[in-house]
Image (cartoon, rainbow, N blue to C red):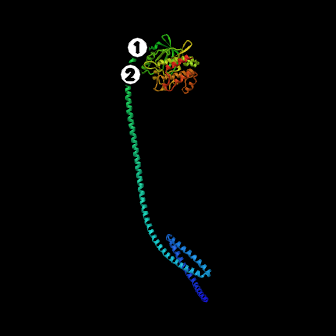
Amino acid sequence: MQDLREESLKRQLRELQKQEGNWPEQMRKMRQREENSQRQLREMQQREENSQRQLTEMQKSVEYSQRQLTEMQHREENSIKQLEEMQHRAENSQRQLWEMQEREENSQRQLREIQQREENSQRQLREMQQREENLQRQLREMQQREENSQRQLREMQQREENSQRQLREMQQREENSQRQLREMQQREENLQRQLREIQQREENLQRQLREMQQREENSQRQLRDCDWIIARHEIQMTDKCLGRGGWGSVYEGVYCGCAVAVKQIHDLILSPHNIRLFNREMEIASKCHHPHLLQFIGATNDEESPLFVTELMENNLRTLLEQRQLSEREICAISLDVARGLNYLHHKKPVPIIHRDVSSANVLLWRQGDQWRGKVSDYGTCNFMQQTMTEAPGAMIYSAPEALTHNQTVKIDVYSFGVLLCEMCIRELPDPDRREVQVSRVRNTEFRGLVRRCLQKTPSMRPTMQEIIDEEKNFILSS
């Protein structure tokens, strides 16, 4: 039995050796086929790369096959080295052969699929080329249409710009027309208003003319009866000048054997209106009688510049202040005299008289025993001079803030009185730019308080001359 097994084994061994002798030939054929497959695969890869490399999947499969073949070769080398496991390796080789055959079949199938895909790719490529040509043709048509559209758009934009420019020009012309229309309407309104104003002024002038005629008739009637007119030859002028001002000069003269002051007013335009105005002022002055007003004696009334005759006084306040400082008793006495004279003018009927030129030069002095007493001068010509001369007769350094406006009341004289009282206390000419500094230099608190109340910027806040008289009487009693 053992011999039989040995013989069977030997026979099997011979068969195996015989099979093993055929195996290299088979391997060579397989490698040959594999090389052909590799060459075909490379050709296919080349074609596939030329077909826009759309066959990347096939390349990956072929690479996978090559990797498996490499593994198979490695296993075959191991089979040669391990002859003691020949049967096992033969089985493996047989299995590998089947696998290789199967892979070859797969490769053939893949090759056919790749060829089919390549044909499809070629067909798709032709279709894509055809579509690309169509797209290129459509693109050229679209570009042509776009160029036409751009040209039309530019033409439309140009037309729109022209329309906009024309519209702006029309709007500008319309605005100009509207502005011209408004200006014409405004001019027409102005003309209508001017016409109404002219008509109103004409009515006022007619009324004023009637009033002037009435006043002239009254003046003529009064002139026949007035007793203030002095013939020029009755006044004897001397060369002794007592003072000069913006309105004229004052000389010492003689009237009816008495020494008098003669005010020679500068040459004026002796129009009928000015003559009537001067006569009216003289009529008012002739009716003013007060111990603290300079006594008006009379005035000329001929074709020459008027001569204004008053009583002759010994001195004036400005000259006295230039010589020495006044005592508080003298300040009280003189300022009280001035306040009484102004208070008389302010209560004159039927219309109050506003002096408008209260100053130290217009306060004249006379002696009562050892005491200087004061009288207010220039009250009779203040209105006349203000209306007939270029410059107002009032000294601006004494003037109230409202002196240059139409809002003038008796409180203008109150303001000037306050400035005069300050001047008497500090013995310094008024300076509007240093008004507050000068007031603060008044030492007597009662005088300083009275000055501040008189210098209130609001006229209604200032005291009346009667209130000033009462306050100064209290000063005298308390001192």
Q: Which of the two residues, 227 or 231, is positioned nearer the viewer here?
A: 227
Residue located 48% across and 74% down the image? 113
Identify whether 440 is placed above or below 16: above
Residue 134's disc is none
State the image coordinates of residue 280 (x, y, percent, origin top left). 43, 18
Helix, strand or loop under label 1: helix
Task: Give the residue type that dot 1 points to.
Answer: Asp
Disc ID at residue 225: 1
| Mark 2, secondary structure of its residue | helix
- Residue carrying label 2: 211
Left or right for 139, reference 103: left
Judge whether 282 appears above or below 3 on screen.
above
- x and y, in percent, of residue 98 in the image: 53, 79
Q: Is residue 378 visible?
A: no
Rate crowding at label 1 as few (under 14), some (14 to 19) or many (20 or more) other CA atoms within 10 Å: few
Amino acid on which disc 2 is placed: Glu
Residue 430, image quadrant: top right
Of the image marks 2 and 1, the number of the one nearer the N terminus: 2
Residue at mark 2 to residue at mark 1: CA–CA distance: 21 Å
**Quadrant that contains the N terminus:** bottom right
